[in-house]
Amino acid sequence: MEPLWKGRMSGQVEEVLLNLGESIHLDIFLYKEDLKGSLEHARMLTKIGILTKEEFDKIFYGLKTIQKEIEQNRFPLKKELEDIHTHIENRLKEIVGDVAGKLHTARSRNDQIALDTHLFIKGNSYQIIIKIFEICKTILVRAEENLDIIFPSYTHLQIAQPIRFSHYLLSYFWMLIRDIERFLFTIKEADRLPLGCGAVAGVNYLNDREYLKENLQFKELYENSIDAISSRDHILNYLYSISVLMIHLSRLCEDFIIYSTVEFGFIELPDALTTGSSLMPQKKNPDILELIRGKTARYISNLNSVMILLKGLPLSYNRDLQEDRKPMIESLELYTILDGIHLVLSSFKIHQNNIEEFLKKGFTTATDLADSLVKEKNIPFRVAHHIVGELIQYCVKNQMNLFTIPKEKRKEIHPLLEEDEFYLNSISIQNSTEKKISRGGTSKKRVMEQIIYARQTLENIFKNLPEKINLDLE
Ligand code: ARG
């Protein structure tokens, strides 16, 4: 079979070039975008008088037939046909005859692939936003459910201060909200139509790009044909948004991996989300979390690889650009990843007993005791810090904690520590969270306020979602 680009070349193409040059195994994931682009291009050619109404109808029928063939797995992929554009054009010719040859008037594969990737990124960013949105809703449900569970916070992975478990969960809510915002930005930036710019310089026809823009649901046009076919900014934005999202998910996975160890024992995943070991019968491994953490590496490197691809690439189109495809198509796995995270978040259990023990063992209210000395006993903070430091030193040496150290010992360290009411109220874990009254803090009132604000934020995002793109051939 002769390549469509044969032009001035004669003779056979080397097998090695076909092997290196084919992208159809990835491009096939763009078939809807490509078909839609072709249909609207044909409609525009009809409007400007290049195709007759009958010719348009034939092409329309051909494109619809191809869509059916692809969806019913009756569309063979051939490496000699390189990419999705030539596959479709070739098949169209088989179905509708020579009129297929007119479809490529005033169009190049360069503006065609640019269009396909813009549509792909707009559509998938939208779907990803919807999935993140669902996860956010689940986080809110679990945050409300577990409002009264007190949990340790960590800095340096050393136990720090008591927090509400909801407060911890909600920190991921806000990360995910920013992820949604990044995908919204990605959509906005990809909302520029590159089609109608030809190979690089524009085309020798007075095409109607405004008409294309309306029909393909774009907000703006690329104003410069060179920029239109060579920019891959939209892909960078998309891969960046994915990388940050994955970094967030990976941190959540890491937390949950740690919290579900025997050593911590704070949370537990349902059996159906874990695996055993072929050797050690006691194992319950959190593979789902490890896999998502592991896959994050690839998503970050996908962003890197496209940045490196672009750096130093002379304008305008170079075949190197085809290498943007794999990173972009790999993003489709995100749906499974997001489903996995959703399942984890909706099904994990919390083991409160273990948590309480660690909160006490970890001296998590030491700072509160120092603060009480300052507030109620008028001791300068540096001195208070020192007194509590000594108390802890004694506890550590004698395997005690703030709750088990005898009263006489407290008194010995400092007379102000003797009085039970003052001392016990100061080290109370429950009281500790309630003292965190600053905005964004972990007291019940503040967390409840946060949940209300979180819900409003979600509602606002939902109300202002951009229009969903429609790739149906109609
Ligand atoms: N398969 C090509 C790509 O994905 C389409 C554009 C081909 N353009 C060209 N001048 N060879 O980038």
Image (cartoon, rainbow, N blue to C red):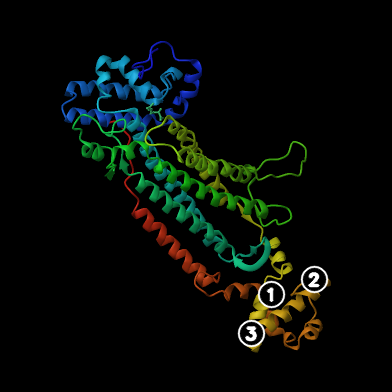
For the residues labelled 2 and 1, the Cα–Cα distance comes to 13 Å
How far across and down, in percent of the image, does residue 418 sit?
A: 75, 86
Viewer-side residue, 349 vs 108: 108
Q: Which residue is mark 2?
A: 396
Q: Which mark sits nearer the N-terminus, 2 or 1?
A: 1
Tell me which residue sits at (44%, 20%) in the image: 77
**Where's ligand 1: which quadrant?**
top left
Element assignment for label 3: helix
Element assignment for label 1: helix
Q: Quadrant of residue 384?
A: bottom right
Marks 1 and 2: in contact by CB < 8 Å?
no
- Regarding residue 346, the answer to whether it shows in the image is no
Please determine whether, in this image, residue 268 is positioned above or below residue 434: above
How far across and down, in percent of the image, does residue 365 sit?
A: 67, 73
Amino acid residing under circle 3 = Val
| Label 2 CA crowd tier, 10 Å (few <14, some 14–19, many 20+) | some
Element assignment for label 2: helix
Q: Which residue is mark 1?
A: 366
Q: Which residue is mark 3?
A: 374
Viewer-side residue, 106 vs 435: 106
Q: Quadrant of residue 73?
A: top left
Tell me which residue sits at (28%, 24%) in the image: 104
Amino acid residing under circle 1 = Ala
Q: Which mark sits nearer the N-terminus, 3 or 2?
A: 3
Amino acid residing under circle 2 = Val
